[in-house]
Image: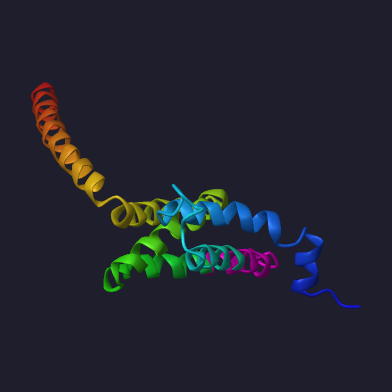
Amino acid sequence: EGETKASKRTALGGRGNWSRRYTSLFNKFLGNGENQDSSPPKEMGKAQEQAENLRDMFLAMADDYRVILVKLADRLHNMRTLQYMPEIKQKTIAAETLVVFSQLAHRLGVWLFKTELEDLSFQYLYPTELRTLNQLLSMRHAQHQSTLQAATHDFSNLL
């Protein structure tokens, strides 16, 4: 009879392989990747459920690419307001954003979304590394400013 999202899912090969692949990615970013055998079944169930939800979302978005853009904008808004969430929730959402949504924005060529999603995810997943990078960039910025001022002065004298 009619074709539904559920029948498309079956035609695309069921849930098994896709779910296993992304479940392992979520486990890795949630910190369960080192020893999956000893991780509690509840955590494995959460990661698998999240992978299934994402799969269903992608199938729903396949009909119209504009839905994907709205979903990316929604995720960007969520990431911008993530500081009000509990820390574990911040890390979970940031990991999902880095693994899925920033890559989706990259594939679609929405570079502004991709860059900001990655930057915001990095802020929550790697705060120590972010501080180190910011310190290095601020040192370089001061060096570049002095070089730029010297070059500007030299060119002004030539003109």
Q: Is residue 136 left or right of residue 95?
A: left
Rendered-image quadrant of the C terminus: top left
**Nearer to the camera, 25 or 8:** 25
Q: Position of residue 103 (x, y in %)?
A: 51, 51
**Residue furthest toward the front?**
38
Q: Is 24 above or below relative to 77?
A: above
Q: Is 127 above or below relative to 54?
A: above
Q: Is residue 62 magenta?
A: yes
Main SS, magenta region, reads: helix
Q: Is residue 64 magenta?
A: yes
Magenta-drawn segment = 53-70
Q: Is residue 85 left or right of residue 92?
A: left
**Residue furthest toward the top?**
158
**Nearer to the camera, 53 or 57:** 53
Count of numbered marks = 0
Kindly tell me whether residue 33 is visible in this rendering.
Answer: yes
Q: Is 101 above or below relative to 3?
A: above
**Nearer to the camera, 146 or 9:** 9
Q: Position of residue 15 (x, y in %)?
A: 70, 62
Rendered-image quadrant of the N terminus: bottom right
Q: Position of residue 132 (x, y in %)?
A: 19, 42
Q: Position of residue 20 (x, y in %)?
A: 62, 55
Kindly tell me whether residue 110 is visible in this rendering.
Answer: no
Colouring method of the image? rainbow
Residue for point 33% across, 57% down: 120
Residue for point 54% across, 52% down: 24
Q: Quadrant of residue 3?
A: bottom right
**Residue furthest toward the bottom?**
1
Residue for point 70% across, 67% down: 63
Q: Is residue 10 left or right of residue 84?
A: right
Residue for point 56% across, 49% down: 107
